[in-house]
Amino acid sequence: MLEQQNSGNTNNNKITQERKENAIRILEKARIYHEKYLLRSRNSDLESAVNYYIQAIKQNPKIPETYYRLACLLYENGQISLDSAIEQCKMAIDIDPNNKNAHLYKGYFLKLAYDFEEAEKEFQNAIKINPINSARPRLILATMLYEKINNVKPSFVDFIRMVYYACSGCLTVLWDSASLKMMYRNITDDTKVFLYKTYGGFLEKIKNSTLAVATYDQAAESTGRDKYFYNKIGDICIKEHAPEIAIEAYKKVLESNPYDRVALIKLATLIQTHFPDNIDDAIDCYTKLLEIEEENDKIYYELGHLYLQKNESLSAVNAFSMALELDEENPFYHNSLAFALVQLEQYDDAIEHYQKAININPDPYWTSIVCQALGSVYMEIKNNPEAAIVLYQTAAVLNPESEESQLAIGDTYFTTEDFDNAIKAYCDAIKINPENAKSYCKCGMALWEKDYTEEAIVAYNKAIALNPEYAIAYNNLGVIYLDDIGNTHEALRHFQKALDCSENYTLAYFNIGRTYAILGENMEAAKNFQKALDLNNITHELDEEDIQYRLHKLFEV
C-alpha cells in the first residue's frame, strides 16, 4: 500500500510540473503578443495575448504576472471595469506580495480611478521592493502628482515630490533593464517605420504610385503597422482610380483593427461610390460605426438610404427615425423619412414629415423639390388636385427656373380638364427652357383637347425637331392626322416613325390597326391589332376588350 501511494504522489508531482512548464511556455507567448500589441496596436495581437494569458492561468493559477497583465489588456479593450482590474491586481499581490509590477499596475489603475492616496502607496511599495530598478513607478508617480496638483488644491510639498520622482526616475531608467529593453524596441521599430514612410513619401512625390504601393505593402508586413500603411495604399489607389485595390487595403486595416473609424468611413464611401450593388458591405461598415458612435445621426441617415436601395422600407424608416431623434430639426431627415413612409403607404405620416421639411426650408431650390414630392402625394394618392396645384405653385415660386414645377402644374390642370390653365403652364415651362421637347409635346396634347389643331401640329413638330427619337410625339401627331384631318397616309407615316423609335410601342400598333381598318385593309389591320394585343398583355396600356372588339369586327359578315 505504501509503495502505491508513493507512486501516486510521483505521478501527481509529474503532472503538476508539466502544467507549470506549460504555463511558462504559454506565458512567454503571451508576453510576445503583448509587446507586439504595445508596439503596433493590432487587435489580433491583443486577442492572442489575452487568450494565452487565460491559458497560462488555467495551467498554473499561481503566477502573479498573468493577472495584472491580463487586467491591463482586458481593461484597455473595454471588457472589464476599473474595479475589476484593481481586483485582478490584488489577486496578483496576494500570490506574491513582493512583486513590484503587481503593485505598479494596481497603483496605475487606482490612479485612473482618481484614488491618488492609495495609488501613491502602491507606487511607493513598488519602489521599496526594488529601489534600483524603479524608474517606471517613479515616473508614473511623478505624473500622478502632477495630475493631483491640477485636480485638487495645489501643494508645494507635492510639487517638490513630483520634481524629485521625475528626476530620480529619469536617472534610474539608465539601469532599469525592462525600460531600456522596451525603449530599444520602440526606437528600432520607429526607425524602420520612419524609413519606409520617407521612401514611400518620396515615391509618391515623383508620381511612382506602383512602387509606392509595393513599398507600403512591404512596410505593413515588416513593421505590423497595418493601420498606417494600408491606409496609405488605399488613399493612393483612390487617386489612381483603382477602387478594387483600395477596398482590399481598407479591409486589411479592419482585419487588425475592426473598429477603425477612418477606415470604416473610407470603405463605406468607396463601396457606395464605385460598387453600389454591394449594399450589404456598406451597411456592415455603418453598423460597426454605430458601435463606435452610437449618437451619430449622420450614420443612421446613410443607413436609411442604403436600406431604401435594398427595398427594405421598414428598416429605412427606423434608421431615419433614429436620425431624427438625434437631430429633430434636420429637414433632410424629415424628407427622407417621408419618402420611406410613402413606400410603406403610410401617407398621412409622410405628409406630416414633408410639411416639416418644407417649413424648415434650408434652401429654396431643395425645398422646391420637396414641394413637388408632396404635391405628387396629394395628386396621385390623396386625389386632391387643389392641394397639389398649391404645392406645385409654391415650388415654382421658390425656384422660378424650375420647368418641372410648371409641367407638374400643367399635368394637374390637364387631369382636371382645365385645358386653358394647362396650356398656360406648359407655355411657362417652354419659356423657362425652350429646348425641352417634352414641354412642347404636353402642350400639343392640351391644344388638341381644345380643338386648336393647327397649333397642336406646330407644337408636336417642334417637339420632334428637338428630339427626332420622340415616339410619343410621332404617335400623337399621327392621331391628329388620322382623326382630325383624315390624312391616312401622313398618319401611317407618323405611326411608323413612332415604331422606329420604340419597336414595342403598343399604342402605335393599335393606331396603325385603326388606320388600316379605315382603309379597308383588314389583314394588315388584324396583324397590327394582334401585335397590340400581345404587347398589351405585358404593358397593360389599353383596354383589352376594345382591341378584341375591333379585331373581331374586321371579319364580321
Image (cartoon, grey):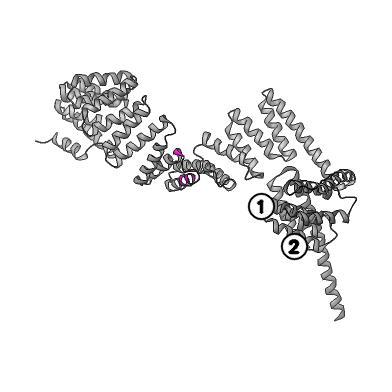
* Foreground of the two, 265 or 104: 104
Q: Earlier in the sequence, mark 1 or mark 2?
A: 2
Give the magenta range.
320-331
* Residue, far left: 557
Instruction: Say left or right for 307 vs 97.
Output: left
Residue 142: percent from the left, percent from the top?
81, 47
* Residue 223 sits above or below residue 86 on the image: above
Instruction: Say left or right for 201 vs 139.
Output: left
Residue on which the image places disc 2:
58
Residue 479: percent from the left, percent from the top?
20, 26
Tell whether position 327 is magenta. Answer: yes
* Residue 253 sits above or below residue 115 on the image: above
Residue 514: percent from the left, percent from the top?
18, 29
* Residue 383 sits above or below residue 499 on the image: below
Image mark for residue 78: 1
Q: Amino acid at mark 1?
A: Gly
